[in-house]
Structures are given as C-alpha cells and as structure tokens.
Image: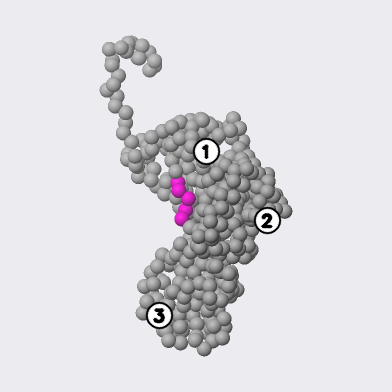
Amino acid sequence: VALYDDVVELNPSNFNREVIQSDSLWLVEFYAPWCGHCKSLAPEWKKAATALKGIVKVGAVDADQHNSLGGQYGVRGFPTIKIFGANKQKPEDYQGGRSGQAIVDAALNALRSLVKDRLGGKAGGSDYGKHSGGGAGNKKDVVELTDDNFDRTVLDSDDVWMVEFFAPWCGHCKNLEPEWKAAATEVKEQTKGKVKLGAVDATVHQGLASRYGIRGFPTIKIFRKGEEPEDFQGGRTRSDIVARAMDLYSDNIPPPELQEILNEDVLKKTCEDYQLCIISVLPHILDTGASGRNSYLEVMRTMADKYKKKTWGWLWTEAGAQMDLESSLGIGGFGYPAMAAINARKMKFALLRGSFSETGIHEFLRELSVGRGSTATVGGGALPKINTVEPWDGKDGVLPMEDDIDLSDVDLDDLGKDEL
C-alpha cells in the first residue's frame, strides 16, 4: 500500500511522539502489504487524509512489519482502523464504511465529541506523556521487590517481568528512575498488566543481588516463567524500555483460535482477513474416536501457538463434510489427516506432504514462511461452496442405525446379484 503525502507513516519509533503525545485526533489504519482489502481501502484512505488535512491527522502502520505495534492494540485482522481521541491510551475501533466519505464523517463526529468534552471541562488533549521523561507515570506502577516477596511476585508469576536492580547512591540509577516510572505506567496500560516493571534496592536486598550476580548499577533483567533471566541490553529511555516490553508482550500473546468450518462465514472471514489460512481435514470420527481427533487438534493448537506472530488463521473440518473444499485442494477421499495452507488473495495453496506431526507441520510452515514449497491454484479459482454443518460435540462417533431399512421393499435376489 503506497503511502502518500497526507497519510503519515507510523512505526514503533515515531508512534509515541506523533500519536500518543499529540493533542490532535488521529485515525490510524493498521494494514498489511499483502492484504487485498487494504489495497482497496488505500485510495479512499488517501482521499480522506487529503480532505482532513490540518483538521484530523491520518496515519497508517504496516502491522505486518511492526507486529508488536499491532499486537499492542489487539489488531487481529487487516485492515483495522482505530480512532485515537482524548484518551490516547484507549483508542476506539472504527466500525464504519470503507469509503472516503464515511471515514471523513466518522472523523468529524469524533472531533465534535472531543471538542465538546473540552468545552465541558473534561481533560483536553493528552496531558499524559506531555512532560516526557519527568514526572509522567505513576510511582505505584513500579513494583517494589524485596528478598521476601521476589519469588512469590516474580518467579511464580505468569506475567513477564522487567526488574531494575539499583543503588540509592548511583547517579545513573537516578537518571533512569523517571524513565522507568513513566515506562511502567505506559507498559501497564498497553499490555493490560501482562508485562510488569519492578525495582530492587540491591544495597538492602543483598541476597537477591548476589543470587543474580549483580555487579554494577543499574542492572535490568528480564524474567519469564520457567526460563533463565536474561539481561536487558537496550537503551535507557522510556521509549526504549516500552519498545522492549511490547516485544515481550507480543511473544506472550495468546495463540489464534482453532475453529471448525461450520459455515461459509467461518471460512471466508478467516481466509480473507489473514495472510494464510491453515486448514486440516481430519479423519471421520468413526475412524479415530474422540481421543484420536483430540490428539490431532492438539498438534494444530501447538503449531498455531508456535506461529502465532504470523497472524495466520487456523481451521479444521471432518473428512467428507466439505467435499467441494476437499476437491478444490485436491485432497478428496483419501490420505487423512490432510493439511493445506491457502493464500486467498492469490487463490494459491500448498499441501502438507510430510507427516501430520509437530515436526512435519513445522517443516511445511517454515518452508512456506520463507516463500519456498510448491503451490497450486485453488480449484475453480475461488473459495469453494461450504456446507453448513453442526459443530462436533466432542464425543465418539455413533454408527448410524441399520434398522431403518424396510426389507419388504428390497428384492433379495437383486441384492445377491450385485454382490457377485
């Protein structure tokens, strides 16, 4: 998506300065260069930006490249448009139409309510972060850690911790303190408390200092549950600290949901909103039972977690439930479990040739993510027709009852001949 003069290109290094600390109202589009809907939005977005010039700021983030910034705002599909108004920490989702006119109308409505709030004496602009570096942030957001509470608070926590070991007499620590404090407040808001900042006075809590081999001050360490602590080597400004915290947060985001293909909407939404949709066709329930099926689903969930930063969609269906889909992918009728990855914009797909296991699927997806592996065109050149089906109830299959056939209608002699 080409960016234009009136659309401001945003990225992790300028987002805070341009958007968060600004008094202006901002409309921000999170896009991916490969996304078809984003390409159709681009000319309208440019039109809106030109019309709103000097009144409302319009920006765009390549969230494929800067996925930590997308993750920070819970961007799951593209394009996602957010309105950053009076409270820059809590942007609103834009739900309106995708035409230049609709975008401009929404911007002016948001602007009207922002101005009205200011008139009524509610906070004007973003006081937050104005005095960057000094005083911004809340002392209480930095957790005070001690020999007594450290294991319970940090090591047993599912959250990620960034911990500063300091000494009260140390000059560098004094410089770091306002930055650390401001970063703690921002990180708490941006990660909904999933990444936390703490501080240890190493002159008082010498047990901790010697356990982690602290030699100089300030030393910052990163703690993740079940892993060895790692040293933070980055810069010491609030934005350096926040950027690292956001990376840690995006490592920690939940994996995408694995959905059963129950109707056309599930398939369309997943395949059109994401770069790739990964589809498994699992054997019929009578062939595997519930435990067999659950072990296949577990393999898929593990892989969805492993590749969660890729923003791919994950789907499954039972053999025979979606025959049009199977035949458009050349699976049809044998070789279950099967897996295909579809790129709905190019209408291309690739089939898993290796084993349906973590190793086999990892190989397959790794090849795909570096642009290797052989692809074919989806049969019919469009997403196939999808039947609406009942969701799997999680139980073993039941053989259909044979008793329904009324034998009085069947000529048994004919039956015998067919058998021969």
Q: 210 or 365: nearer the eye?
A: 210
Above/below status of 160 relative to 258: below
Residue 1 among magenta residues: no
Colour setting: one colour
Q: Counting other residues with Cα less than 10 Å from the Cα at mark 1, is it few (<14), some (14-19), or many (20 or more)?
A: some
What residue is drawn where x is 40% and y is 80%?
146
| Picture quadrant of residue 173 | bottom right
Above/below status of 287 relative to 140: above
Q: Position of residue 287 (x, y in %)?
A: 38, 37
Q: Which mark is residue 359?
A: none
Above/below status of 270 relative to 197: above
| Picture quadrant of residue 290 | top left
Q: Which residue is mark 1?
A: 268
Q: CA distance from mark 3 to mark 1?
A: 52 Å
Number of residue marks: 3
Q: 407 or 24: nearer the eye?
A: 24
Residue 257 among magenta residues: yes
Q: Nearer the viewer, mark 2 or mark 3?
A: 2
Mark sitting earlier along the chain (2/1) = 2
Q: Label 1 sits on what residue type? A: Lys
Q: Which residue is mark 2?
A: 54
| Residue stretch rendered in magenta on the structure | 254-258
Q: Counting other residues with Cα less than 10 Å from the Cα at mark 3, is it few (<14), some (14-19), or many (20 or more)?
A: some
Q: CA distance from mark 2 to mark 1?
A: 38 Å
- Whether residues under marks 2 and 3 lie with C-beta atoms below 8 angstroms apart, the answer is no
Q: Nearer the viewer, mark 2 or mark 1?
A: 2
Q: Which residue is mark 3?
A: 146
What residue is drawn where x is 44% and y is 74%?
140
Q: Is residue 53 visible?
A: yes
| Mark 1 residue element | helix
